Amino acid sequence: MASTPTLFATPVAAAPAQHTAAAAGSRTPMLKISDLRVAYGGIQAVKGISFEVLEGELVSLIGANGAGKTTTLKAITGTQPVAFGGIEFLGRDIKGQGPWDLVRQGLVMVPEGRGMFTRMTIVENLQMGAFVRDDDKQIEADIENVFGIFPRLKERRNQLSGTMSGGEQQMLAMGRALMARPKVLLLDEPSMGLSPLLVDKIFEVIDEIHRRGTTILLVEQNASRALQLATRGYVMDSGEITMSGAARALLDDPKVRAAYLGE
Ligand code: ATP
């Protein structure tokens, strides 16, 4: 495996697009999902999907409401039991491990709904994000780096997070995840419920975080925006992956355009 990307390194150009995971040759996947199956009682929500995320990639998992995207992320992060299949992070089996253990290893999720500590201030939430770290001296510097990405959070650093707007909470949730210095960041519907202006801002920021070296798996219903940023994409429908490939090719595909881009 190549060296671990450093989140707050000097911005660099995004990793070159790989049209398929196989085209990446011997690069080890950061995240590898094999034949994953998840059920809620008798309902099969995820029906044997396989995909991978390579170092430096931004991979978008798109699909309509109810396709099984959130369930997939919950299974990866150990908050939903897996009926069958493999989940590997950095080449190690992580199936059954909980979110705290995974954050320690560098796999960090920003859930839909954001999960803020609403009675804590912005700064306190960011400090909580660094709970797995023991390099105290760097934490203050990283908070400043988060403020560099999200100036709005700096202006409101002492405000209780529960009193912030939806867009500000989404920014804080992403900032808090970055404080753990993730190797892979899982984003669940970050644009959900935001005004068009804030949607623009959130996608700009995701692009910037990727360019600074963080590998990202982005789950989105906003297929157009998610594929515009991505290296590769997977399309999920009724618990199955129905299409995959270079993000540009998916964006140009008439079936994707008809089903997910409203054309
Ligand atoms: P959304 O964008 O709406 O979150 P999604 O693609 O993330 O959609 P999931 O939330 O993973 O889809 O849901 C997949 C299927 O599993 C849906 O049919 C949904 O109704 C069902 N489901 C999700 N959560 C539960 C639950 N807790 N109990 C029972 N069924 C569930």
Image: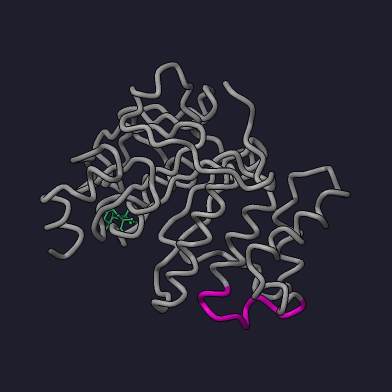
* Residue at image coords 31%, 48%: 40
Ligand 1 image-quadrant field: bottom left
Extreme-front residue of the structure: 13
Image height of 182 relative to 70, above or below? above
Q: Residue at x 19, y 49 (%)?
A: 252
Please identify the residue farthest to the top as the structure is shown: 26
Does 221 appear in magenta?
Answer: no
Q: Which of 57 and 118 lies nearest the eye of the viewer?
A: 57
Q: Is residue 114 left or right of residue 53?
A: right
Where residue 72 sits in the image (x, y, percent)? Answer: 37, 44
Looking at the image, is 71 positioned above or below residue 51?
below
Q: Could one spot residue 42 in this view of the protein?
A: no
**Rendered-image quadrant of the N terminus:** top right
Please state the extent of the stretch shown in magenta in the rendering: 158-168
Q: Quadrant of residue 163?
A: bottom right
Note whether 35 is above or below 151 in the view shown: above
Q: Position of residue 230 (x, y in %)?
A: 38, 47
Q: Quadrant of the C terminus?
A: bottom left
Say which residue appears at 23% left-offset and 58% top-offset: 64
Q: Is residue 126 left or right of residue 95?
A: right
When asked about the image quadrant of residue 176, the answer is: bottom right
Give whichever of 197, 112 is nearer the camera.
197
